Image (tube, rainbow, N blue to C red):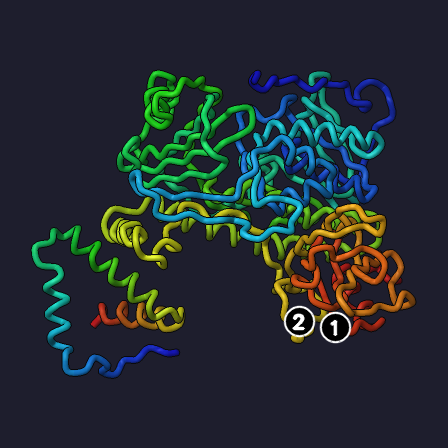
Amino acid sequence: MSLNIDFNLGPDSDKLFNELLGAHEGLSREQSEQLNAGLILILMNHIGDPGTVREAITRARAALDR
Amino acid sequence: MARYQYEPFPYVTPPELDGRAPRSAPVIIVGAGPIGLAAAIDLATHGVPSIVVDDNNVVSVGSRAICWAKRSLEIFDRLGIGDRMLAKGVTWKLGRVYRGDQEVYNFDLLPEDGHKFPAFINLQQYYVEEYLVERCADYPDLIDLRFKNRLLSVSQDEAGVAADIETPDGPYTLRGDYLLACDGANSRIRRQFGLDFDGRHFEERFLIADVEMQADFPSERWFWFTPTFHPGQSALLHKQPDNIYRIDLQLGPDADPEEEKKPENVIPRIEKVVGGRPFKLDWVSVYSFNCRRIDRFVHDRVIFVGDSAHVVSPFGARGGNGGMHDVDNLCWKLARVVTGQSDATLLESYNDERVYGADENISNSSWTSRFMSPEPGVEMAFRNAALSLAVDTPFARRMVNAGRLSVPCRLTGSALNGDDDPAFDVPQQVGMVALDAPLTTPGGDADWLMRHLGGGFTLLVTGDATLDDAIVPDGVTVLRIGSGSFHDSEGKVAARYGSGVYLVRPDQHVTARWKAADADGIRTALSLCTASVTA
């Protein structure tokens, strides 16, 4: 398996993005960090394939430099 | 139960200093801790004499290494003290991990039966050293134990090693072919050689205490993240023989070791852990730890073994057990080299295989340390997320890292390994320690497979496989399971090995296997594994 970087979320993508932000509403910075961390762990486990996860980490890290 | 009585071992004036003929031995061992003593016994089982020097004259003060893994017990069994350790030790296999006061995860370290030794026993290091010293006495002609003999310096050349030793009666020099540096984490030999001890120091400080207490705690490893009795930190409780409990409390990086060691500070902390039961303090220490190793373990004729070569955090029981892996790996090779059966290049495989093993231990131990004491900020966020998820999310329980306990190193990539056959579809793999299994002897008695492996090379014949006696090389033992000899009483040999011919090393690792063995294949594998001197 390799990382899918094409659009994959369907018509609800804006709604999901908004729901992601909504999940952080009212949280402290620290709680937000932990929420993000929990989400990442859940999604990482769901993906399962180590190569795909590593590719995602590399890609997200590279995006910081832009 | 009386507390452990420390009986000093007698100092005897060495023959070099009272007019008797100076002695030499093929192997000089520096350090009479568990690793040095085990090495002396292992070499003795191969008929190789050694002289062991130690600057001290008592066993380990304090329980120190207490968790002995199944693999170490199998090695100790080969050395003759496995049953004694098992009888005295507290057997356990279950670990429980708590967050606050709630259990989030438990693990069973040996979920299957059919093995002589359990996943772990807890036994204080002083008992292990006492048993080893007593076992050394069974080899009076091969093991010369010299207490209060302090190593000053080592030199070596192409002909051998020379160790300058200091005693209460003055100095003398010992000569040998090889010297084993089993002189621990603060190895004087490592410093004399100026070897970099690369790795990481962890700032976190821990209080370790042995308390004597009547309690009905089960024989399990209990680990807490942020328990109510020790807020914001971690805690570990372990049961040892003689009603001694090991308590390990994280103190944070700023704790003052001298202050924390004072009974008036220790006792209130322990009282909270044990919930008001009466107890007596037996031993207290405050430590921080390193995860480090030297680049190479073999420096010509000076070989580093155990903590002198590599150190890890205690969470995972990979220090003492890692050192026993070293002994197991090295001694048969060294015995072959000093007796001229193998070329000295065989020792290079000790370096390769045990550097690999040490790195595995260092990685596991470092990952645990990072999980237990995360940096504030994002590391803490991931750690706490994993702990919170673990309450009701099975995958996260596996991420919670309260120690990844020592398991046998898998030498699947070793250059010593020979043939394999992809047709094998069984748990046993080439490079792994042979899996134990119950047997019955031809006479009908219960027995164990592991008792018949190791020491020398063995060809293990399982299931329907056949092996013609005519193609068995000299010096190799054949062990046939089934067909009128040992009986696979519970079918575990079949389940773990299938049908085949397995070549098993003196350290009980499988080095090659065949569905249909032929003379060439066996000879080639044996030669690869031994760097044999054929001339």
Residue at (56%, 42%) from the top-left corner? Answer: B120
Decide: is B223 above or below B10: below
Q: Quadrant of residue A22?
A: bottom left
Q: Do the residues labelled 2 and 1 touch (CB within 8 Å)?
A: yes
Residue at (80% x, 31% y) in the render: B138
* Other residues around mark 2 within 10 Å, as few (<14) / some (14–19) / many (≥20): some
Q: Quadrant of residue B160?
A: top right
Which amino acid type is marked by label 1? Lys
On the question of residue B245 being in view, the answer is yes
Q: Quadrant of the N terminus of chain B?
A: top right
Q: What element carries label 1?
A: loop
Is label 2 in a helix, a strand or a loop?
loop
Q: In this view, does B389 lie to the left or right of B524?
A: left
Residue B331 to residue B4: above or below: below
Q: Could you say where residue B283 lies in the image, as x and y percent from the top left? A: 48, 22
Q: Mark 2 points at which residue?
A: B424
Q: How many marks?
A: 2
Image point (35%, 39%), residue name: B224
The amino acid sitting under disc 2 is Phe
Q: Where is residue A32 in the image (x, y as percent from the top left)?
A: 16, 56
What residue is drawn where x is 17% and y is 50%? A30
Residue B182 place in picture, x, y as percent: 63, 37
Residue B188 percent across, percent down from the top left:
58, 34
Q: Mark 1 points at which residue?
A: B515
Asked if marks 2 and 1 fall on the same chain, the answer is yes
